[in-house]
Structures are given as structure tokens and as C-alpha cells.
Image (cartoon, rainbow, N blue to C red):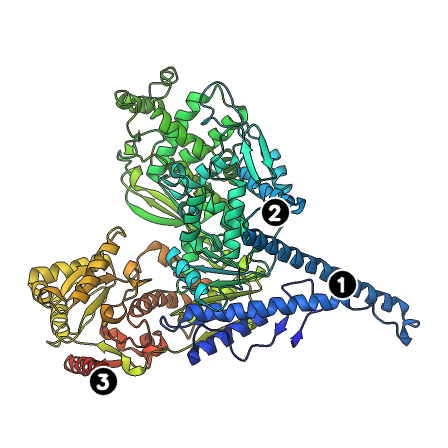
Amino acid sequence: MDSVTEPSPGNKGGILKIKPPEEFPFPFPPYSIQTQFMEALFNTLNKGELGIFESPTGTGKSLSLICGALTWFIQYQAAYKQQLEELVQQNNVQKDDNDEDDWFAAAAVRQEVNHQRLQAKEELDKIKKREEKIKRIVDRRKHLKVVEDQQNVDEFNDLFKEVKWIKKAVNRELSQGVGDEDILLEDYNSEGEEEDEENDPDEPDNRLKIFFTSRTHSQLTQFVREVKKSPFGKDISLVSLASRSVMCINPSVKNLHSQAAINEKCLELGKKKSKSTKIDTDELTVKKSKSGVCPYIRPSGIENLRDDAILGIHDIEDLVESGKKSGSCPYYASRAAVPLCDLVVLPYNTLLHAGTRKAVGVDVKNSVVIIDEAHNLLETITGIHSVGVSGQQLSSAYSQLTQYKNKYKTRLKASNLLYIKQILFVISSFIKFLGGSPGKDPTLPVGTREETKLSTVSEFLADTDTYNQNLLKLVKYCNVSQISHKLQGFVEKYNPAVDPTRVEETKKGVGAFLESIQKKNQDSPKQEIKTDGEPRKPGSSPLLGIVEFLSTLATNFGDSRIVIKTGSTLAGAGIRFLLLDPATQFKEIVQSARSVVVAGGTMQPIDEFKQQLFIAAGADATRISDFSCEHVVPEDHLLPVVMCTGPTGVQLDFSFQHRDNPKLLDELGRVLQNCIAVIPAGLVIFFPSYDYEEKVYKHMEKAGYLDKINQKKLVFREPRGTGDSDKILHEYTRTVKMRKEGTQGAILLAVVGGKMSEGINFSDELGRCVMMVGMPYPNLHSPELKEKMNYLNNNVAAINGKLAGQVHYENLCMKGVNQSVGRAIRHRTDYASILFLDHRYSRSTVQEQLPSWIRKQVRVHPKFGPVLGDLRKFYKSRTENSLNQ
């Protein structure tokens, strides 16, 4: 195999280039654009580049990613191993005639070669050790019995050490006093904890892997199924990671009401120790004399689940189901499988948040990172790292923690009391900053006006008088002591009736308010608690969100802002951390990974990814490559039309200044009445916002248009919440396919950025037409958006004569448009029309931001008549072609 290597073969991130195959393994003959996609991807990975890949939905993007990346991966691994073997086996550098004249240089060369050989041998030993582990797992599964030699006992002990690592998430719990041991804080020693972290025995795993991530669990599940169907289904080991809330099978943990509460409860159960533990080497099981740990954290069961994950390709649901049957934790089994797997499938938050990556043991160094559905990657990174707390949370946390301190202050160690007082000081400072009073009902008027303002982190810390607090140390204390979990246990147990003798110490301020709470709950101590007048669900602690906010505040200085919202009451106020530069959080991935690939159906504008994601993260422009392909659907299967006026000649201008005009809304009703007479089956209409969709719906209902439309196509509406979305989509689908009650299909009113605009396939009859009403520009008066635009204007170069902030504003709109219109064409034989209802779509600057496969076919009609003519001709030709086939 032809290859070129750097002098240091021990560096797996080194440039080892391999020759592309003449044909890529594929489950069926690939389209030409799929072959081009795989060739471009192979070259990107081969050169260690940062790639931006655009392939319209319906072109087999997932399979192209799988087959292109895994073809390179398998060939690279084989070439790398062969290179190591050759280097280990080569003889010492032969002595030549010049050695006597320059013996010092010759000795240096020999020393360098020997060093390379030693590195190569170490790497080769690691590869062989992994191969031997996999072989032992295969043999164990093949023979359906446990191997009893000492080698496997050692392997089990290694796994058991890994399971014990769970317990290191927090300090060992110490009983203090009589009763309430489960909710009392243990003695805290920050120095001892630091020593534990430094002595962590876990070895870093820098073996080359592929990390694949996407937006939702359903998309990850679909990807895993595609891997199963691919030619690599039996050659690649794959594991799917997910959050505890998705993978937990312990009902007492899974049923908690927040992700943070689930995490804390899992760690609390995982850290507890039994009094004695005995390993039975005959059955490789652990027998405990006393319970206290999570019953599903069983080393032998976790080992079996890990083996299943390594040897077979399972999605998240498969692993969870296996865990339920065997009574073993799939969350920790999947984590245990990561070091031995080639392909790791994980959700966005796990990969894109540095703290979460570290917590689950994901190290992207020298590996390949593939981020699918990356069209909103910049906004996603910003969202993940933008954390906020409400005035209600602050008030509830202050009330609960004060009661906790008063009840246990005689039993808590001095270090715990000191930290609790510091936390209370910080919370009270935030409450006062928002205009409230610590310990008072947050629903009472506070005399401040409703406004939103921004400040820097340093200004916020100074204004709240918390600039001299060591927030990092405080956050570490909260995480290690699990004070949020202890506090929640206290609240649920006492509901929250505190010791009357403690309350009587003061009759005003905090004491008076706490006493009033107690009196309200004396008659029904077992009912759901109320803290500061707010009903609370068991399992959710307001302190958890505050700790997360403090953590973000302590670790994210620089290009960020604090958004401060004040109101007439403390309950209506809040504070939020806003990340302005997502590249700072993506920098570690760009600099550590061998190659990073961002892919999506619509990645326009590509320059935004280059400038604001890769180059801003420190990448050299020469390392960035991009690939974009056309759609596989024939050109005559698509009809994109810009509609500038309606049937009576009213200009379609849905800009903010004109969109509420009754004449315009009437014209929209007439457009729909005319179009549904021509468009068959399903029609999906996207609006810029839920508020505007509701305004249009009410106007058409009042003006009588809705009744006339329902006579031909039943109208369904996307709900604001996600709870009823599946039900509405099911009813819409049933109506389109059944054609009941004399209707000719159905209409679905959806919203750009809503659930229906991403991840839903309106293929075939479900989406014979997609209609865009107006342009979904975000609110230009939003303080957060203004600050983001100002930041870009000051830090990013102008693009084609436009300020970077203005370009960002326009991009937010067009990204939403492109995602929405992409819902229609889903496969090669599908067909649909796309109607852009706004004269602004006729501008060349707007059309340039549409996907190329749509842009080159756009027809602009100043008058309405030709639009109906084009639609009739288009659907008639498609129907005739279908009959002739």
C-alpha cells in the first residue's frame, strides 16, 4: 500500500496518507454524487483537514458518511499497523564510510531510530492488547461460558476498578449524629479531593476513533440502523452514548423531574459502599453483604452488556432493553465499551460541552469527529453554554438552604457551615441585585420596572459584590458535597417543617417568612411542598440551576455577557449568561482532533462556518475544505416559485411593518383558496412565528376563509408545545392518505424553527407543496441579538461589503427558510412545488442564499395568474408520468 509518513510513527495524529479505493463499499450501486461525496470525505480525513459537507436530504448523506469514513478508517488502521510492524522489524542503521568522520551525528541518528522503534513497539503492543481483549470476548460469547483463567480474572478486576470509579464522583459519605444521615453533609476536605483527582488511575485513551454526533436521539438511532445495513456492519465495533435520563433503568432515579436531579441521584447511589465485597472468580460476580449501592451497578452484568455493545451494533433502545432484561446499568456499560470501540455515537451536548466530555471520558485527541445536522451548529454551541436562573429559583434556593442551615447548624462541621454561608451570600446578592429581598415572597411587588440590560461578567460580579468570591472553589464544593441533592432530600422529608425552637429565635425577616410557611403546612405535612409560594415537584432542586450558572460564570470570561431581566416582582426577574463567541468552546475539538467534519442538508452560508467556527478557533485556512453536491431528484420534479402579488394584485409583503394589514391577510386567504384547488394531497405552510400563525388563523376564521378552505382540505395546526405534536402529525397523515369526508387532502400550519421544520419528513403525498409565508427574520430589537451583532461587527471582517452582524442577521433567517423548504423532497422519485409568498424573495441577494438545487430553478412571477398556470402544468405532468410508468 502506498503511503507517506512523518518521521514519528508513534504519533497517531501524524500524517499517514493512504491511497483512495477505486470503488467504495456500498449496500447498492451509489449515485455519482454519493461517490463524489465519499471521495471528498476520504481525502479530507486522509489529510487531517476540517471539512464542511453539504448534501441535500434524500441524497443518502448518512450512508455516504458511513461508507466514506469507515472505508478510510479500516484502510488507515491496517496501513498504520503495517507501518509499525515494519519499523519494529527493521535492523539498526547500517554503518557507512562517513561514520568514522562524523561519529557523533551517526550516533544521534541511531538513537533517534531506536527511539522511534521503541515508540512503534509500544503502539503495536497496545493494538495487540486490544485485539486480544476482543478475541477473549468473542471466545467467551462463542462458547457461552466464562473463561476461568487468571488472565480473565485480571480483566474483570480492571473492569471492577472502572465501576469503582463511579464512586469517585463525590466524597465518601460520613455519618454525623443520629438520624438524617442521608441528608446531612459529610465533612468536606477540598485538598484531599484534589489529591484524589490527581491520583486517578484511569489511563487516557487516545486510540483513533470516529465520534459521530447529531441533534436528536432519533437521528442517532437512525444512523446506527444505517451502519447495520452498510457493508461494515460486521467489521466495526460501535457504541451509543446517551444521557442518564435516556439510559437509566432504575425507576427511583429515572422518574425524577430534571436531568440534573437524575445525575445527582445516580452519583449519590453510585458512590455508596457496602461493608464487604467478595469477588467470586468462578462466576465472575460480586456478592455484597449489605445493600446501599444502585442495584443495577453490577460489575458482571455491566461487563456482559459492555461485551454485547462491542460485538454487536446496538442503538440506544437495544442497549436499554438488554439492561432491563439483565438488571444491569446500560449507562455505565456503554461508557465501559468506549475504549474498545471504533465508532462512538453520541448526542450534541455530550460532545460539544467540554465538562460533559470529561465527565463521560470522551477524548477526541487524534480522532475523527463527524457532526451531522450541523446547519445550526454555531447557535447550538451558544445555547449549550448559555445558562440562566430565575428570580423564583434564587428565592426558593435561599429559603430552602436557610432552613437547612438552621436545622443542622449544631451538627454540621465548620467547613460545611462556612461554604453554606458563602452560597447564601452569593444568592442573596443576586436577589438584591434584581430588586428583591432575601427571605421574602418573590411574588410581592419590588418596585422595579420591567427592562432587559446587558453587562460584562466582571461588571456583573462587581455590581453584585461577589467579585471577591472564589466561585470555582464554591462550585467544586457543591459538586463534591452534593449539597443540592442533600437539600432536596431535606425538603422532601420535612416538607419543609423546620425545628420550631430555631424559628422562634427571630420574628422578622427570614424567620417570620419561614414560620409562615411552616404554619401553612402543619395540617398536611405529607403534601407537596411549597417554597416561597411556589408549588414544587419532588426531585427538582432550584440550587442545581444556580450551581450550573455559577460554574459557567466562573469558567467563561472574555467574549460573553450577562443578560439581566428585571420586573415588577422578583419571580418575574432573571439572570442569564450569554456566550458571544462559540469558537472558544469549539477550539479544543478543532485543535485536538485529527479531523473534524460538519455535515448537513443545507450548510449555506459556508463562509460562516469557515470564519466563525474554524478560523476563529485557531485553524489555518489552508486546512479547511468544503464539498457541496446537487440533489438526486430530476429537475422536472421540483417547481420553486416566488409569488410577488396575490389574485387581486395586492403586493405580498410580510415584513414587520405590513404583515398585520387586514388587506394583506385577506389576500393571503385568497391565495390559499386558489392554490388548494390545484395542489393535490398535503400542503405544509410555514409561518415566521407562532404568534403570527395564530394571528393569520384567527383572521381567516373570522373572515370566513377558513370554512371554505376546510371544505377542500382540512386544516391542522402545529401546537406550541411538543406534547401534542405527534398526535397532530398522525391526524394530518391519516387525513392526507385516507381522503375522507370528500376532502382533497390536508393543510398543516407550521412554524419556522418549530418541531415540524426539522427532522420531519413530508415525503410524497404528505408534502406535495411547501409554502413559505414571509421571511422569518429574528426580532431585531432583542438585546441579545443586538449584542451578538455588535460583537461580530467589531471582531469579524466585513463580508462582500456587509458588516458581519448584518450578515449574521440575514443568515439566521435563511437558515430557517432552507430547513423548512427542505422538508418536501425526500427521495429520488419524490416531487413537490415550493411557493415563496413574499416579493423580497425575488431579490438576487436572497436567492443566492438558497440551496443551489433550488436556486437554479426558481421562477419569479410578478403577477398571480402565471403561478396557477405553472402549478397546473407541473402537477398534471407528474400525474401523467406516474400513469405511464
- The image position of residue 426, as x and y in percent, is 44, 35
> In this rendering, would 574 be left or right of 300?
left
Q: Residues within 10 Å of mark 3 (few under 14, many from 20)?
A: few
Front position in the image: 713 or 240: 240
Q: Which residue is label 3 attached to?
A: 884
SS of the residue at dot 2?
loop
Residue type for callout 1: Arg
Q: Earlier in the sequence, mark 1 or mark 2?
A: 1
Q: Is residue 691 left or right of residue 326?
A: left
Task: Say which of marks 1 and 2 sits in front.
Answer: 2
Point out the residue furthest to the right here.
100
Q: Nearer the viewer, mark 3 or mark 1?
A: 3
Q: Where residue 151 sits in the image (x, y, percent)?
A: 66, 47
User: 524 above or below 249?
Assistant: above
Report the side of 439 relative to 7 (left or right).
left
Give the distance between the C-alpha atoms of the residues marked 3 and 1, in whole angstroms: 68 Å
Tell me the element at label 1.
helix
- Residue 769 picture location, percent across and down: 22, 72
* Residue at the spot 47% in from the left edge and 21% down from the top edge: 409
Residue occupying image coordinates x 82% and y 63%: 111
Mark 2: amino acid: Val
Precedes in sequence: disc 3 or disc 2: 2
